[in-house]
């Protein structure tokens, strides 16, 4: 029955927030959802270059281009899905793997290959994405506690302040900030007790 509910864990969509309000229980928002939103915000600065890389991947998937590419590598182009930031990671990683095999004499491909300064910017982005990718995997582990999530988010905020909108402990997206804060304190105290 509803009297057995202590809290609800769900993504941060308005429907779930509304259900939590109607049931009069606190809601713990999905950390992966918040992280995905934060990463999408982080990537906004690179959208022009990322769209160009995606266009390149689309071009490389065309029949003739794909046939030429298969002659020099088994690697296939990877497009991004803008609703999932880690598809950008996969696409960019594949771009750097494919780059040595790209025919820069093919005008359709050459115009889409980033310039030297853009390549440096994209390589720096790739370095950041290499840091962010394991976070996605960690947040999906069933053993990941809300305390671990808070520590991960605090670390990321030091490194990437632009993510504050979604990752800060006082972010507007948090449905029940006092409840989450209380859980984190309890888990932190329990962790301290287990150490002693």
Image (spheres, grey):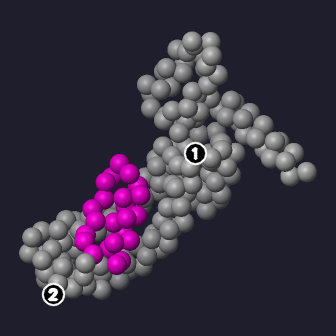
Q: In the structure shown, which secondary structural element does the residue marked by tag 1 occupy? A: loop
- The residue lying at 51 percent from left, 46 percent from top is 32
- Residue 37 against residue 98 in the figure, above or below: above
- Residue 195 against residue 119 in the figure, above or below: above
Task: Tell me if 30 is positioned left or right of 7 in this view.
Answer: left
* Residue 158 numbered mark, or none: none
**Relative depth, front residue between 157 and 23:** 23
- The residue lying at 43 percent from left, 52 percent from top is 40
Q: Which residues are magenta?
A: 75-97
- Residue 175 visible somewhere in the drawing: no
- Residue 181's image quarter? top right
Task: Tell me if 44 is positioned left or right of 24 in this view.
Answer: left
Q: In the structure shown, which secondary structural element does the residue marked by tag 2 occupy? A: loop
In magenta segment, residue 33 = no
- Residue 120 visible somewhere in the drawing: yes
- The residue lying at 87 percent from left, 45 percent from top is 193
* Residue 105 numbered mark, or none: 2
Q: Position of residue 88 (x, y in %)?
A: 37, 61
Q: Position of residue 56 (x, y in %)?
A: 22, 70
- Residue 149 against residue 73 in the figure, above or below: above
- Residue 138's image quarter? bottom right
- The residue lying at 54 percent from left, 66 percent from top is 131
The span from disc 2 to disc 1 (Cα, nearest Å) is 49 Å
Instruction: Read off the residue under disc 1.
Output: 142
What is the crowding at mark 1: few (fewer than 14 residues within 10 Å), some, or many (at least 20)?
few
Kindly report which numbered mark, 2 or 1, lies closer to the viewer in this rendering.
Answer: 1
In magenta segment, residue 81 = yes
């Amino acid at each position: 029955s509803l009297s057995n509910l202590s809290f609800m864990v769900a993504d941060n969509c308005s429907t779930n927030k509304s259900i939590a309000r109607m049931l009069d229980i606190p809601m713990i928002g999905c950390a992966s959802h918040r992280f995905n939103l934060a990463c999408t915000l982080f990537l906004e600065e690179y959208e022009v270059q990322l769209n160009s890389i995606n266009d390149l991947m689309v071009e490389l998937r065309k029949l003739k281009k794909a046939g030429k590419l298969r002659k020099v590598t088994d690697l296939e182009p990877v497009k991004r899905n803008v609703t999932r930031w880690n598809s950008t990671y996969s696409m960019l990683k594949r771009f750097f793997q494919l780059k040595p095999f790209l025919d820069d004499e093919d005008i359709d491909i050459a115009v889409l290959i980033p310039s030297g300064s853009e390549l440096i910017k994209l390589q720096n982005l790739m370095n950041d994405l290499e840091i962010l990718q394991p976070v996605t995997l960690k947040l999906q582990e069933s053993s990941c506690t809300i305390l671990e999530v808070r520590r991960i988010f605090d670390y990321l905020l030091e490194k990437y302040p632009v993510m504050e909108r979604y990752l800060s402990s006082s972010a507007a997206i948090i449905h029940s900030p006092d409840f989450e804060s209380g859980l984190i304190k309890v888990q932190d105290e329990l962790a301290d007790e287990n150490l002693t």
